[in-house]
Image: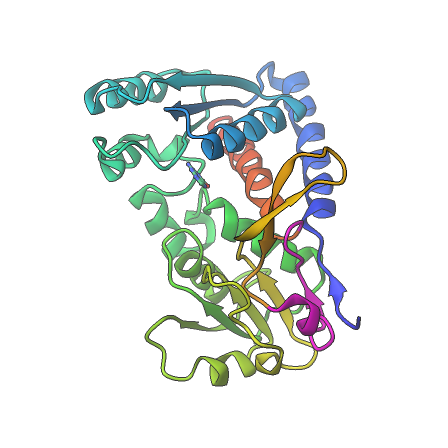
């Protein structure tokens, strides 16, 4: 193996330690801690497991965490009223509505009802606009791209003038990370290309990339011969390709594969993120950082 592994599991620990320390300092000086509410509608096992991990992490870093579970049949109006309640609750700095929502609820309407200054997911159009403007206009970058940029910075990869190719144009990953890498500032100043399902020659674009960020949701889409030797490869894909019995717990667990053929790619790339244990752990970590930032904005510390 020639590539250096960028491990999200290790970077997560560093960042959570930093957050814990800062939360304790703010508590000491200002007598408050960040407040995060997670709203879960229904009982989807995947959503329950995400929310449980968010709550556990929030407790670990010393936040005040409110878990608000609502039944699957809550009306849209009642959910909007609940959001309004938390928008007006001074002790709450971050509101997270776990997605997806049941079909009878308009997701866009719900996300747009969150106060943009408490939108720690960074999904509200105001925060998308702030991200597009860049610089000190930015409040809450969406958590997965925020995590990707932080991994690139902490790995010491040069981004200024780098050719960044982003595979995928989703609102949650592809578009925001492309936007972030093109801005002026640390961990950015890159020349960015977004490629997608209608791109004519995917391979040719990928081969130019000094930093290749893949968020396509297609297992093993990126072939080793598409990778420039020494490039930094960030694999955002988490594809369930089967099941196996866990050696640790004896329970059935999903076999996960990224969007990049890892075993072959690691022999060519200079840096690469594994799946699992790469980008995945960064998303919740950056949610915590956004919630801390929200309190710091309110206290005038940022
Ligand atoms: N469901 C899956 N990922 C996410 C996320 O990052 N934020 C929210 N709110 N819901 C999700």
Please tell me in which quadrant of the rendered image residue 2 appears: bottom right
Q: Nearer the viewer, residue 211 or 244?
A: 244
Percent x, y for residue 92?
A: 45, 20
User: Residue 36: percent from the left, percent from the top?
Assistant: 49, 24
Q: Residue furthest right?
A: 1
**Residue 27 or 285: which is nearer the viewer?**
285
Task: Indicate whether residue 225 is drawn in magenta.
Answer: no
Q: Residue at x 69, y 24 (%)?
A: 25
Q: State whether residue 296 appears in this view.
A: no
| Residue 34 in which image quadrant | top right
Specify whether 152 is left or right of 216.
right
Image location of residue 200, percent across then percent down: 36, 83
Q: Is residue 25 visible?
A: yes
**Image point 41% across, 84% down: which residue?**
201
Chief SS of the magenta region = loop
Which image quarter is the N terminus in? bottom right
Pinpoint residue 286: horizontal percent, then vertical percent: 56, 41
Which residue is drawn at the image coordinates 38% and 36% (left, top)?
99
- As drawn, 76 above or below 128: above
Residue that appears at 71% across and 58% down: 6
Q: Which residues are magenta?
A: 261-277
Residue closest to the eye, 238 or 83: 238
């Amino acid at each position: 193996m020639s590539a250096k592994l960028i491990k999200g599991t290790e970077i997560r620990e560093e960042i959570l330690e930093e957050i814990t320390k800062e939360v304790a300092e703010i508590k000491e000086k200002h007598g408050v801690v960040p407040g995060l509410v997670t709203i879960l509608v229904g009982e989807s096992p995947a959503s329950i497991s995400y929310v449980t991990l968010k709550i556990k992490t929030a407790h670990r870093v010393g936040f005040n965490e409110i878990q608000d579970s609502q039944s699957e049949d809550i009306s849209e109006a009642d959910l909007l009223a609940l959001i309004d309640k938390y928008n007006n609750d001074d002790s709450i700095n971050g509101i997270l509505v776990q997605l997806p929502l049941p079909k009878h609820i308009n997701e866009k309407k719900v996300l747009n009802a969150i106060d943009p200054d408490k939108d720690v997911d960074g999904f509200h159009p105001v925060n998308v606009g702030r991200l597009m403007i860049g610089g000190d206009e930015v409040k809450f970058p969406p958590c997965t791209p925020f995590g990707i940029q932080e991994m690139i910075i902490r790995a010491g990869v040069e981004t200024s003038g780098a050719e960044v190719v982003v595979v995928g144009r989703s609102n949650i990953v592809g578009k925001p990370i492309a936007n972030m890498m093109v801005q002026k500032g640390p961990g950015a100043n890159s020349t960015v290309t977004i490629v997608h399902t209608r791109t004519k020659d995917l391979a040719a674009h990928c081969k130019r990339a000094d930093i290749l960020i893949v968020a396509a949701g297609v297992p093993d889409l990126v072939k080793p011969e598409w990778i420039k030797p020494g490039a930094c490869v960030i694999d955002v894909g988490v594809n369930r390709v089967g099941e196996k019995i866990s050696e640790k717990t004896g329970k059935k667990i999903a076999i996960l594969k990224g969007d990049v053929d890892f075993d072959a790619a690691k022999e060519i790339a200079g840096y690469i993120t594994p799946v699992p244990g790469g980008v995945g752990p960064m998303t919740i970590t950056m949610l915590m950082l956004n919630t801390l930032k929200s309190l710091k904005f309110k206290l005038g510390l940022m």
